[in-house]
Amino acid sequence: MPAALAPDYAEAAAWLARLRAHDRTREDEARFREWLAADPINAQRFEHVSTIWDDMDALRDVARTELKPRLLTRRRLLTGSLAACTVGGLGLQWSLATAGVYTTALGEQRRLTLEEGSRLVLNTDTSVKVRFDEERREIELRRGQAFFDVSSDPRPFSVKVGAHDITVQRGRFDLRLEEQQLSVLAINGIATLSEDAESGKPLARFGNGERVRIDAEFHLEQDRPNVNDLLAWQSGQAAFRGEALARVVKEMNRYTERELVLADERAAALRISGVYRVGDNRAFARSLALLLPIKIEETDRVIRISAI
């Protein structure tokens, strides 16, 4: 970590290094969880130093450099698969990806650095398959949501989602597949959405803040949404702007097995705004009860929400 790191963040940086070390133990992980629980600010500091580390492109340097065995053992924290740790209700996993299938469980996020330097962040309940060869970089998004930071490379970079392909050269993009509806957000860079590779028929070309959505009937919409809201999931949050509770509950249920259930149509029609931490539906429901005319009933697996 940078030498100028503020003292308040030094402990968070030490935990980051400890959790990424090859000799990390279960006792280390338990003590880390205790440290997180001791003060809510600890999770924020840990997220902050993790982001700094990611932005330093350290993983990319390792992926592109041939390391001697002696150095590899010292820097295994960068090249090995790293154990999950809990931050803000989401399990975060880091690894260097070369080829194969990579998945996340419910409530888990995973960060990958690909062999040519591109970076992926997989959201909850997501699966991707990586296939690279000398001519093409290809990823299949089988389910869920993923953020792509595509590195510059002579080979095109394509993401196959069902019957469609998204092709880019470089840039940052967010893809989500939900109930046969595909959403592609271009944060920067230019993307082309096409029918499958066999036909190659282009359907849309977009970039820099634009989003394309296409449903199972191939109806296509293009707009310019709030990018920060759509990327809030990367920090373990969900942003809502006057959205119906039916939509909000569906989104929050993506991150935990403790399900929110709307008991009546009046509750489903209520609307809320705000940014909420995902992964803890109990805390979320209690917040709703302070803001909306509802009552909540809890069991071990379900939280029922009813209009008053």
Image (spheres, grey):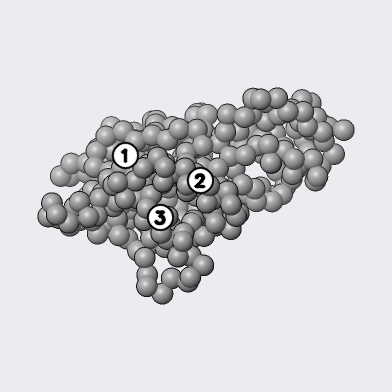
Query: What whole-number distance in Å separates the C-alpha atoms at marks 2 and 3?
Result: 12 Å
Query: What whole-number distance in Å separates the C-alpha atoms at marks 3 and 1?
Result: 29 Å
Inspect this view and state whether residue 27 appears: yes
Q: Is residue 123 or residue 157 the one in the foreground? A: 123
**Label 2 packing within 10 angstroms: few (<14), some (14-19), many (20+):** some
Name the residue at 45% across, 65% down.
10
Name the residue at 79% across, 40% down.
289
Name the residue at 78% across, 32% down.
296
Residue 204 at x, y percent in the picture:
43, 46
Q: Amino acid at mark 3?
A: Leu
Residue 158 at x, y percent in the picture:
31, 43
In the figure, 97 relative to 56: above or below? above
In the rendered image, which residue does mark 3 sit on?
Answer: 16
Inspect this view and state whether residue 181 appears: no
Dividing the image into 4 quarters, which one contains the N terminus?
Answer: bottom left
In the rendered image, which residue does mark 2 sit on?
Answer: 33
Tag 2 near tag 3, CB within 8 Å: no
Quarter occupied by residue 129: top left
Query: What whole-number distance in Å separates the C-alpha atoms at marks 2 and 1?
Result: 34 Å
Name the residue at 70% across, 34% down.
246
In the rendered image, which residue does mark 1 sit on?
Answer: 139
Dividing the image into 4 quarters, which one contains the C terminus?
Answer: top right
Numbered badge on residue 226: none
Q: Amino acid at mark 1?
A: Ile
Residue 30 relative to residue 171: left or right: right
Q: Amino acid at mark 2?
A: Arg
Residue 93 relative to residue 21: left or right: right
Give the label, 2 or 1, closer to the camera: 2
